[in-house]
Structure formats: C-alpha cells, structure tokens
Image (tube, rainbow, N blue to C red):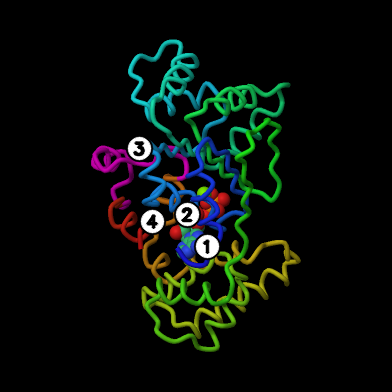
C-alpha cells in the first residue's frame, strides 16, 4: 500500500486504544477497503484483537441479510433468532474484537426509507459493546450516520494519492523502472485515484500497450466523450473503459460477457461450479479462458 502511512497509523492507533469506532470515507476506488484491510493485518492490531471480522456489505440491503453474514463470521450455527444470538455472542466476548463492515453505504442507503432505520438501531446496540471496535467503510465524502459513538471515534477520509505515491504504484504494477512523459501525463489525468492508476499500469504490464500508445488511446477516448457532449464521465470511468477495451479483452470475444455474467452473481462463481456452469453456456463460449483474461 502506497502513500497511506498517516491514515494507517491513525487507524492502528485508534484501534489499539480499544472500543474504537472508525468510519473510512472516500470515493470509489480510492482505497477504503485497502486501508481497512491493512489495519486489520497490522501486527499490533492483531496482537490486541485476537478476532477480526471483515464483512463485505455489497449486495446486503437489510439487517436481516446482514445477520447471516455476521453469524458465519462468528461461527454461529443455529440460524433461528439470529439478532439476539449475534448480540449475545458479541457481548460475551472475553477478548477485544474488530468488526469491519465494508461498503456499508449499500445497507445504509437501502434502509433510509424506514424511520428510524433498523440498521441504525443495530449499530447503536453493537457500538455499546465494550470489547467491540467497529470499522465502517463508506463511499462518499460525508458520513450519513446518526449513531452516538463513543469518545474513541475517528473519521478518516482517503483522498487522492500524491504524485510520488502514484508513480510508485504505477511502477510497482507495470514493472516500468522509469517514469516517462506519457506516464506523467496519464498520472496527471487520473489524479491520484489508486484504482485508475492500477488499471492503466496493468495494461502496460501486459505489454499490449506502451505508455505512449496508452496515452494516445486515452486522448482519443476523452475527445470522443467531449464530442458526444458527455463530459461527466470521470477519469476513473475512462480508465475502466480503456481497461475493458484493451487489446487483451478484444482478442477474447467472450471476456465482456463473462464479466457481465459475474456481475450478476453477488457471491461470485466458485471454482468447483465452473464445469457445471459451462454446460449451460453455448458451445463456442469457453468460460475458463475468459476468466483468465479477466484475471489478467
Ligand atoms: N494506497 C494504495 N496503494 C496501492 N494500491 C492501492 C492503494 N489504495 C488502493 N489501491 C488499489 O486500488 C484498488 C481500489 O482500492 P479499494 O478497493 O481499496 O478502493 P475502495 O475505496 O474500497 O473502492 P470501492 O468504493 O469500490 O469499495 C485496489 O485494487 C487496491 O489494491
Ligand atoms: Mg471497497
């Protein structure tokens, strides 16, 4: 992880004080999950918190849907009366533990129609549990939460990486050793968004585009967007588009369709089911090579 030393040390320090409530804010692809995971894997944090649970809330739209995920994390087998069971187990914890609810905005935004939102009540309850520290990551720049947190509270906003860290990240992924003017221009365009930097660097790493041809593709895409009067497409979206239409993807006609299929499966596709899944697809649609293309 590049350029997040201050945020990480604040996060680690806050967690190590115990009974912490942390909100990590930031735009899409800015590195909220990366920061949260790096703190959960920090040696000091691990030493002080024998159990740490990370739950992705993508696709979770209610407390009822969150509870089974919590039950899995906490190894609760019997599924009746989960609300009370989860609360009881958390209250009985004899060692400090951390619960990280990633992309919490999905559940939060889904529940704002009911007043007070059940998730707010649930958060309120778990936030009083002395052994428990909570990390929430939320897309956006403002915390919408209305929960009385304890004193040991911290709101971190992950912003754009500075130019030095952007260059380090680009070099690290692409394998290039020097930053030429085309990379400088690309990095200026993506403005320190780690996901965008990573996508562009991966295209260069594959050797299918040089920094120069990638810059030309970028300029073409941007001009096309302006011509069509759609200048709202962000630089992150242009990076995603370039990544989706890079030569690697174009050589594999099924790759985009495979991505579309995967995006419909909230829990992804397990390796054990690939063979069976393949039998339901047309004969000329080979899933495995397309998955390999996407992974690259
Ligand atoms: N500081 C960093 N150094 C290196 N790579 C980073 C850094 N921050 C993020 N990344 C990389 O950028 C990508 C996007 O990061 P991440 O998934 O953490 O963003 P996010 O803010 O959680 O996005 P979302 O809003 O979609 O959940 C990941 O591939 C991650 O590895
Ligand atoms: Mg995330």
| Tally of numbered tags | 4
Asked if the residues shown at circle 1 and circle 2 are in contact, with their CB atoms under 8 angstroms apart, the answer is yes
1 or 4: tag closer to the N-terminus:
1
Q: Residue furthest right?
A: 229
Q: Secondary structure at mark 4?
A: loop
Looking at the rendered image, the disc whose residue lies closer to the viewer, 4 or 3, is 3
According to the picture, the residue beneath numbered tag 1 turns out to be 4
Looking at the rendered image, the disc whose residue lies closer to the viewer, 3 or 2, is 3
Q: Please state the extent of the stretch shown in magenta in the rendering.
A: 263-285
Q: Secondary structure at mark 1?
A: loop
According to the picture, the residue beneath numbered tag 3 turns out to be 50
The residue at 33%/25% (across/down) is 75
Q: Quadrant of the C terminus?
A: bottom left
The residue at 66%/63% (across/down) is 234
Looking at the rendered image, the disc whose residue lies closer to the viewer, 4 or 2, is 2
3 or 1: tag closer to the N-terminus:
1
Where in the figure is residue 30, as x and y percent of width and height? 57, 58
Q: Residue furthest top?
A: 80
According to the picture, the residue beneath numbered tag 2 turns out to be 34
Looking at the rendered image, the disc whose residue lies closer to the viewer, 1 or 2, is 1
């Amino acid at each position: 992880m590049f350029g997040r030393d201050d945020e990480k040390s604040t996060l680690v320090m806050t967690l190590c004080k115990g009974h912490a409530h942390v909100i990590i804010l930031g735009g899409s692809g800015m590195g909220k999950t990366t920061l949260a995971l790096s703190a959960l894997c920090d040696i000091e944090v691990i030493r002080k918190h024998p159990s740490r649970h990370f739950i992705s809330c993508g696709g979770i739209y209610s407390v009822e849907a969150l509870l089974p995920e919590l039950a899995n994390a906490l190894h609760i087998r019997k599924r009746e009366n989960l609300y009370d069971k989860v609360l009881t187990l958390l209250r009985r914890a004899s060692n400090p533990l951390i619960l990280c609810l990633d992309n919490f905005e999905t559940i939060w935004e889904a529940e704002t129609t009911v007043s007070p939102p059940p998730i707010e009540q649930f958060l309120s309850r778990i936030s009083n549990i002395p052994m428990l520290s909570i990390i929430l990551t939320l897309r956006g720049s403002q915390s919408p939460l209305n929960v009385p947190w304890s004193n040991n509270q911290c709101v971190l906003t992950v912003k754009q990486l500075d130019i030095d860290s952007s260059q380090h990240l680009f070099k690290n992924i692409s394998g290039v050793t020097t930053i030429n003017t085309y990379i400088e221009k690309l990095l200026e365009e993506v403005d320190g968004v780690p996901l965008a930097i990573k996508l562009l660097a991966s295209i260069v790493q594959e050797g299918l585009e040089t920094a120069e041809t990638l810059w030309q593709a970028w300029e073409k895409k941007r001009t096309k967007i302006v011509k069509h009067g759609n200048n709202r497409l962000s630089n992150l979206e242009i990076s995603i588009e370039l990544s989706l239409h890079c030569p690697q993807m174009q050589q594999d006609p099924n790759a985009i369709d495979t991505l579309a299929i995967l995006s419909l499966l909230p829990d992804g596709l397990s390796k054990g089911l690939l063979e069976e899944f393949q039998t339901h697809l047309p004969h000329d649609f080979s899933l495995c090579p397309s998955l390999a293309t996407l992974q690259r």
